[in-house]
């Protein structure tokens, strides 16, 4: 781990959360930044963190995205175990008949929502069961179909991150997904939605792909991460930020990569 880079990202997260509070930015975004800081071992006793917890209570029945952030957040508070379990139950009430999860009740299933849900449930130490299995089954079928029609890098990355959580996917499927992600790395070392995207390389796509590839015993993955690090260094502003909106998106993925989450 590069401690100087991590310290820089943590400082940026603190500053971002402070500005969010001052500007009354939507609570879901505050929650995401806050749980990442908690994942770094910080902010648990901060009065502002407790205020976020109190403000979130009246919004318990929000969409899946909010619930996922809140589950991540609550996972760091052992005294909130009952509330955590209740929110997990509500999340599964939004599970579609096909096994996937959408952004809100009755929304179609989406890979980004599904892998983030798996990630949050694992962080909350939720045990593997049939509901988790249904999410994985849907993701696998959906991603196989997506690959045939072009695919998107953030979906491939999400599938790989989910694969590290409950050890569900077979090695061949993981290898196939990893190869797809490696082939879709741009020539400059970054990632965009896919290699043919007019957007080119994009910070959060790049850091999410790096996070997905880290930890695999693969020389090709290691080389791809090194190239991506060069892209990040060449495209970073003096402020330590990248060209992205919302601004916290890149910082969050960069931080999670650096701590090996």
Image (cartoon, rainbow, N blue to C red):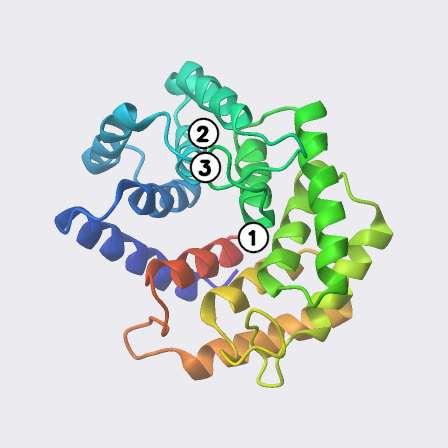
Q: Are marks 1 and 2 in contact (CB under 8 Å)?
A: no
Dot 1: element: loop
Q: Nearer the viewer, residue 185 or 41?
A: 185
Helix, strand or loop for disc 3:
loop
User: How far is mark 3 from mark 2, CA to CA?
Assistant: 21 Å
Residue 246: percent from the left, percent from the top? Answer: 33, 61
**Which residue carries the number 2 mark?**
75
From this viewpoint, is residue 129 visible?
A: no
Q: Residues within 10 Å of mark 2 (few under 14, many from 20)?
A: many
In the rendered image, the residue lying farthest to the top is 82
Image disc number at residue 106 = none
Callout in the foreground (1, 2):
2
User: Where residue 183 sits: x, y (%)?
Assistant: 72, 74
25 sits to left or right of 170:
left
Task: Count the labels in the image.
Answer: 3
Q: Nearer the viewer, residue 89 or 52?
A: 89
Task: Name the residue rendered at 75%, 59% in the picture.
Answer: 177
- How many other residues sit within 10 Å of disc 3, few (<14), some (14-19) or many (≥20)? some
28 up-or-down from 2: above or below: above
| Alpha carbon separation for disc pair 1 and 2 | 18 Å
- Mark identifier at residue 104: 3
Q: CA distance from mark 3 to mark 1?
A: 29 Å
At which x and y percent is residue 79?
Answer: 38, 17
Which tag, 1 or 2, sits closer to the chain's start?
A: 2
Q: Residue at x 74, y 46 (%)?
A: 140
Which residue is nearer to you in this view: 214 or 186? 186
* Residue 82 lies in quadrant: top left
- 91, 120: nearer the viewer: 91
Residue 260 bears which disc, if any?
1
């Amino acid at each position: 781990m590069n401690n100087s880079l991590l310290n820089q990202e943590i400082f940026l997260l603190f500053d971002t959360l402070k500005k969010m509070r001052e500007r009354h930015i939507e609570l879901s975004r505050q929650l995401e930044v806050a749980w990442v800081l908690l994942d770094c071992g910080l902010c648990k006793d901060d009065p502002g963190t407790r205020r976020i917890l109190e403000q979130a209570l009246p919004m318990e029945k929000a969409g899946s995205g909010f619930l996922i952030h809140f589950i991540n957040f609550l996972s760091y508070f052992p005294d909130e175990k009952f509330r955590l379990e209740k929110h997990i139950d509500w999340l599964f009430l939004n599970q579609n008949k096909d096994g996937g999860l959408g952004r809100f009740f009755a929304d179609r299933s989406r890979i980004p929502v599904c892998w983030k849900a798996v990630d949050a449930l694992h962080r909350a130490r939720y045990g593997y069961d049939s509901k988790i299995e249904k999410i994985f089954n849907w993701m696998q079928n959906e991603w196989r179909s997506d690959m045939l029609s072009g695919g998107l890098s953030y979906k491939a990355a999400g599938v790989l991150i989910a694969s590290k959580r409950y050890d569900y996917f077979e090695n061949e499927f993981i290898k196939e997904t990893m190869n797809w992600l490696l082939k879709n790395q741009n020539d400059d070392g970054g990632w965009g939605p896919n290699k043919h995207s007019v957007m080119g390389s994009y910070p959060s796509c790049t850091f999410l792909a790096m996070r997905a590839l880290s930890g695999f015993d693969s020389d090709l993955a290691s080389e791809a991460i090194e190239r991506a690090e060069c892209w990040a260094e060449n495209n970073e502003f003096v402020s330590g930020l990248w060209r992205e909106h919302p601004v916290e998106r890149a910082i969050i993925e960069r931080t999670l990569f650096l701590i090996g989450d």
